Image (cartoon, coloured by chain):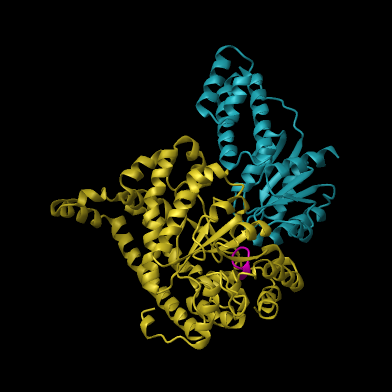
Chain colours: A yellow, B cyan
Amino acid sequence: MSNQTTFTPSADYLAREKRFNDAVSLRKPDRVPVASLAAFFVIRYAGLTHAEAMYDYEKMSAAWLSSTKKLNWDMAPPPFTMFPAPVMELLGLRTFKWPGKHFPVNSPYQFVENEYMLSDEYDEFLTNPSDFVVRKMMPRMAETLEPLGLLPPLHWLSSGYTLIMLGASALGAPPIQAMLSNLAAIGQEMNKVNAIQGKLIQDLAAAGYPLITFAFAEAPFDWISDMFRGLRGAMLDMYRQPDKLKAAMEIFTPFAIQSAIMAAEMSGNKRIFIPLHRGAGGFMSNKQFEEFYWPGLRTVILALIDHGLLPMPFFEGDYTPRLPYLAELPKGKVLGHFDVVDIKQAKKIIGDVMCFWGNVPAQMLVTGTPNQVKDYCKMLIDTFGDTGGLILDGSVDGVPPESKPENVEAIMETAVTYGVY
Amino acid sequence: MSQELIQAITEMREDEALKITQQMLDAGKDPLEVLEACRQAMEVIGKRFESGDCFIPELILAGEMLRQVSDLIKPRLQKEATHKKHGKVVIGTVEGDIHDIAKDIVAFMLDVNGFEVTDLGVDVPPAKFVEATKETGAKVVALSGFLTLAYDPMKATVEALKAAGLKDVKVMIGGGQIDEQIRQFTGADGWGRDAMAAVKMANEWYSS
């Protein structure tokens, strides 16, 4: 990425970007683009196990490049989804379980949802968010970071006197000494990961494949629900302490925006992935969605658009009941990845607002046949093709890891045969 | 007062529900009357959930209210409430998957609808389902899974139950990426989108 300025894109690279951008802007490209958020499927397609990909960065990188070329989609899937297991081990991370350690080698990693912030800790968090996260949450999230709980409140260290007497003294404590050397090792390991990932992204670009995304943002409600309070906690807070829940979400709204902008500036990649979790139909009522979920998400989406970025929300679950809200967004400025949705309703309500990305059902890709997949893709093309606002992909995980390769290949086959405009 | 309690619970007024419970107990009402009011309130909430008029926050809060109400009445109960259970259900998230939210909600709704639920937790291997089904004599097994990886262990669990001779046991599956195609793939007897679908299926299977 440091070579960003010296990179000269090939004709193929430019053609793929144009095809993708045309569809996003609701203009007809030469044909329907295919782009996927696939993760472990890319690895399996190259004959690697999930565990190998998470533990061996070089193997992962080679597999990613070869699968990207072989699949020949219009964008390269995002390799940063292959979290580095050695870094997670060095951290003693408790927020994930992963293959090769907790699961068999071909499982995906899974998030361990927990109340990393307890129900009576909002005030502490709201008064001093960083201090709370560093001294209270991080020790809960990762074993290696437990000694952070021994530090004095960080704002106490705001003078040369206290920095010496309190700060430097704390650093001398044996558990903190041990942690500091662990932290150095974690940083060194992550340097290796980033060097290999950076090289991979260059190689993908040189092979003619733009990277689908480099950065992600979350809806503020999801951030608090996923990372702090858990689904159960956050949903009880909606009744028991709604104002505190909203105040916490507000703290994370600028974070979601600014971190995405920073990553976009650093990478030169304007496409921001926004995976969404608890706003789907069935989770809460439209009224609750309006009160707790949509305001934060809308603010993030509009701010990213204002900064010239492309928000790519992944509407996981059934978003049919929320389509009228999505229709408020500016035309041709958002790329919506759909999981389960009523296709006719989607066409009617947001067909002129945003490009439809998705949504060959996971069930079909894993247990169905290429003909079923082709028929489904044709139905999508027949529905959304009139505006050009369609990009093909699976419904969740891009395409699920367990997909049959011939079913996945059938998506591109349909795009180049049936999907020519 | 029973009516007030039902209303407080269904309208999600937690503090009031607990206050009314306490008042009922102080007035010497039979704790079983309180329990009956809770049951009726849950019936209303279940119907609203089914018709899309209430959602997960309400189910979770209702569960919390029920837990606190039963904590209040427990000391006054002569013996464990001998509610006639509709039947036994063994439930769990299948091997390799650690997602528990949907499974917990289904278990809760089965429980408040009169089923005796054995919850095996998450990442449950087929053999454990077989063992628990034999032990409890349950005629219904509910398999949950959020990820696509759950398809194979669901299938393996259905096969393991059959192989263990539990042929008249019915299996239902549910979760994020489940549909009729996956029901056929796994060999399960039924699938559903939400907790009330599970209750309905269990009721049908136990009455057939």
Q: Position of residue B54 (x, y in %)?
A: 61, 39
Residue B100 visible in rendering: yes
Look at the picture and state if A87 lies above or below A164: below
Q: Is A240 in front, or is A334?
A: A334
Q: Position of residue B183 (x, y in %)?
A: 76, 56
Q: Main secondary structure of the magenta part?
A: loop
- Membership of A167 in magenta stretch: no
- Membership of A393 in magenta stretch: yes
Q: Position of residue A326 (x, y in %)?
A: 54, 55
Residue found 57% across the figure and 52% down from its top: A324
Q: Quadrant of the C terminus of chain B?
A: top right
Residue found 33% across the figure and 60% down from its top: A179
Asked if residue B52 lies left or right of residue B155, the reply is left
Q: Quadrant of residue A178?
A: bottom left
Q: Which residues are magenta?
A: A391-400
Asked if residue A46 lies left or right of residue B113, the reply is left
Asked if residue A75 lies left or right of residue A157, the reply is right
Q: Position of residue A249 (x, y in %)?
A: 41, 48
